[in-house]
Image (spheres, helix red, strand yellow):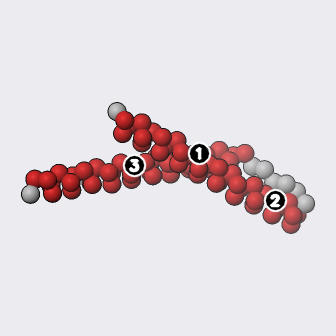
Amino acid sequence: MKNGLLYLRLLVRSVLFLSLTGMVVWFIVSLMFWWKTGEFYINFGKAILGLRMAVVYGFGITLAAFIFNMLDKIKKRKKEKD
């Protein structure tokens, strides 16, 4: 059960980190657009898409960590058997 909570924490942290990173990049691009044209361009549809992508990438990161952890456990059991 403890490992499940660790993976859940990893998922939440990775989604938050990727969301914040995406928002910062989105804000910087908006500032650059404002500097060039004089309009501050905000597209909330793109923000929702970025959040969805952060969730998908967060699941991918968590799944990869889970798979690599399971592979390490399998290798450890093989070494103990031999």
x%, y% of residue 79?
15, 57
x%, y% of residue 56?
50, 48
Q: Residue placed at 39% from the left, 51% from the top?
A: 65
Q: Is residue 49 among what the camera can see?
A: no
Q: Residue placed at 87% from the left, 64% from the top?
A: 35
Amino acid of disc 3: Leu
- Residue 27's place in the image compared with 2, above or below, is below
Q: Closer to the N terminus: mark 2 or mark 1?
A: 1
Q: Marks 2 and 1: CB-CB under 8 Å?
A: no
Q: Marks 2 and 3: CB-CB under 8 Å?
A: no
Q: Is residue 32 left or right of residue 53?
A: right
Amino acid of disc 1: Leu
x%, y% of residue 4?
38, 37
Q: Which residue was labeled with disc 1? A: 16
Amino acid of disc 2: Leu
Q: Is residue 42 left or right of residue 19?
A: right
Q: Residue placed at 48% from the left, 40% from the top?
A: 9
Q: Closer to the N terminus: mark 3 or mark 1?
A: 1
Work out which residue is located at the far right of the displayed protein and give it.
38
Quadrant of the rendered image containing residue 31? bottom right
Label 1 secondary element: helix
Q: Residue placed at 81% from the left, 63% from the top?
A: 32
x%, y% of residue 38?
90, 60
Q: Which mark is residue 63?
A: 3
Q: Which residue was labeled with disc 2? A: 31
